[in-house]
Image: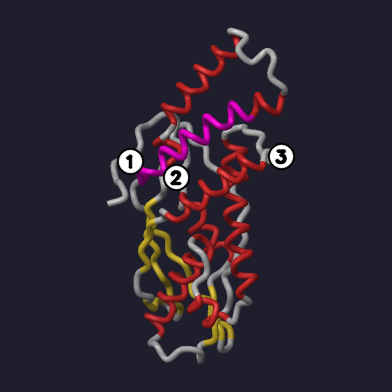
Amino acid sequence: MKTRKLIIAVLLAAMCLSLAACGDKKDKKYQKYVNDLITANYLGATDEYIEATGANKSDAEEMYDNNLLRLAGALESYYGLTVNSDDELFGEIKELAKVIYGAIKYDTGEAYKKGGSYYVDVTIYPIDILNQTDAEVKAYVESFNERVSAGEFNNYEKEAYEHEFAGGIVDILKSGVKEMKYADPVTVTVTIVVEGDTYYISNDDFIKIDDLLIAPYRGGETSGDTDTD
């Protein structure tokens, strides 16, 4: 099976929390920490998260914005677009990234103890936007190439030509996110690392979560039939 995925550089924000900072039982406390961590990175940091972690609000907001920029850049690279110098289109792709991350679906289970360590299972429903829009993107590229061969863009400057092509891809993705599809759920287990009176999850565990949020391209297979409802 041919697979291809978005390559997104992860900006980790797995901040440490104090065991003494909250009176909840450990199973609830660790579950909430993992849930809040995902929320802060992909949906935007809540006041509750900032208070619990002691994070600077502007830093937390910058972290979220940087994650949007990374996804926008990954989409640009995946589709071979050149829009970094095109403020209008890059702004649209960044807004698209916000909508995509805003549609993430996941469940965090209660923490459980095994062999002296605590673990949290995170079930993720990967967003299937790459496969969901694949047929339409391919048809668009084929049609665009025919227009190129017919000389429609002979008098276009390079920037205008790239804007025209990229705009069509962006429009397809914007349409796709209105009826988001999801691939089959995948469950990953993260370990709660306890050091002294603080706890956190490792970079590797956070990356495991990040890697599953958007399903890879599966070589023309149909999208999963799980929708937003």
What's the distance in space between the residues labelled 3 and 1, CA to CA?
35 Å
Name the residue rendered at 55%, 77% in the picture: 50
Give the structural element (helix, strand or loop) at label 1. loop
The residue at the far top in this view is 150
Q: CA distance from mark 3 to mark 2?
A: 28 Å
Q: Position of residue 152 (x, y in %)?
A: 60, 12
The residue under label 1 is which amino acid type?
Answer: Gly
Q: Alpha-carbon neighbours of circle 1 within 10 Å: few (<14), some, or many (≥20)?
A: some
- Say which residue appears at 49% left-offset and 34% top-offset: 171
| Amino acid type at mark 3 | Ser
Secondary element at tag 3? loop
Q: Position of residue 91 (x, y in %)?
A: 60, 46
Picture quarter with the N terminus: top left
Kindly state the secondary structure of the residue where label 2 is placed. Answer: loop
Colour scheme: secondary structure
Q: Are marks 3 and 2 in contact (CB under 8 Å)?
A: no
Residue on which the image places disc 3: 85
Height in image: 1 above or below 120?
above
Q: Residue at x 69, y 41 (%)?
A: 84
Which mark is nearer the camera, 3 or 1? 3
Residue under label 1: 224
Residue extent of the magenta highlight? 163-182
Q: Is residue 91 magenta?
A: no
How many residues crowd around disc 2 within 10 Å: few (fewer than 14), some, or many (20 or more)?
many
- Camera-near label (3 vs 2) is 3
Distance from the alpha carbon under mark 1 to that under mark 2 = 10 Å
Determine contact: label 1, label 2, CB under 8 Å.
yes
Report which residue position mark 2 lands on: 215
